[in-house]
Image (cartoon, rainbow, N blue to C red):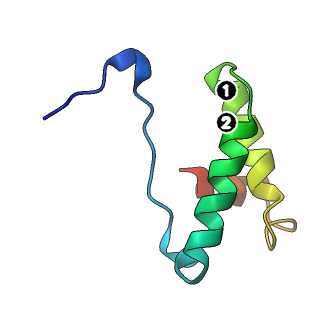
Amino acid sequence: MYKVPQEFYLRLHHIRPRFKNDVENVLLYVAQECSKIPECAMQDYGKALNASIRLYPGNESKTQKRIHRRCL
């Protein structure tokens, strides 16, 4: 089995079940937003990703804690 070198390893999580009816749109949106974020420190990347998730339709009124949990 192929093992990804540690320097290229980035842990990803499968989307949560609450998105099951909109999975294709969510995956496309997140992939596009991830590709727009420039190379940066992991903390900065996380903040940028959280900001992008907040812009997804239906997330505008969510608290930062809830947005952050969606990233985990």
Q: Secondary structure at mark 1?
A: helix
For the point 60% across and 55% down, the residue is 69
Residue 70, relative to residue 1: is it above or below? below
Give the x, y percent position of residue 60.
Answer: 87, 65
Give the x, y percent position of residue 8.
Answer: 42, 22
Q: Residues within 10 Å of mark 2 (few under 14, many from 20)?
A: some
- Which disc is residue 2 wearing? none
Residue 52, relative to residue 37: is it above or below? below
Q: Count numbered badges in the picture.
A: 2
Which residue is situated farthest in the bottom direction here?
A: 21
- Which disc is residue 46 wearing? 2
For the point 35% across and 18% down, the residue is 6
Q: Secondary structure at mark 2?
A: helix
Residue with the mark numbered 1 = 43
Amino acid bearing label 1: Gln
For the point 66% across and 42% down, the residue is 34
- Residue 35 in the figure: left or right of residue 23: right
Give the x, y percent position of residue 5.
Answer: 31, 19
Give the x, y percent position of residue 42.
Answer: 62, 25
Q: Quadrant of the N terminus?
A: top left
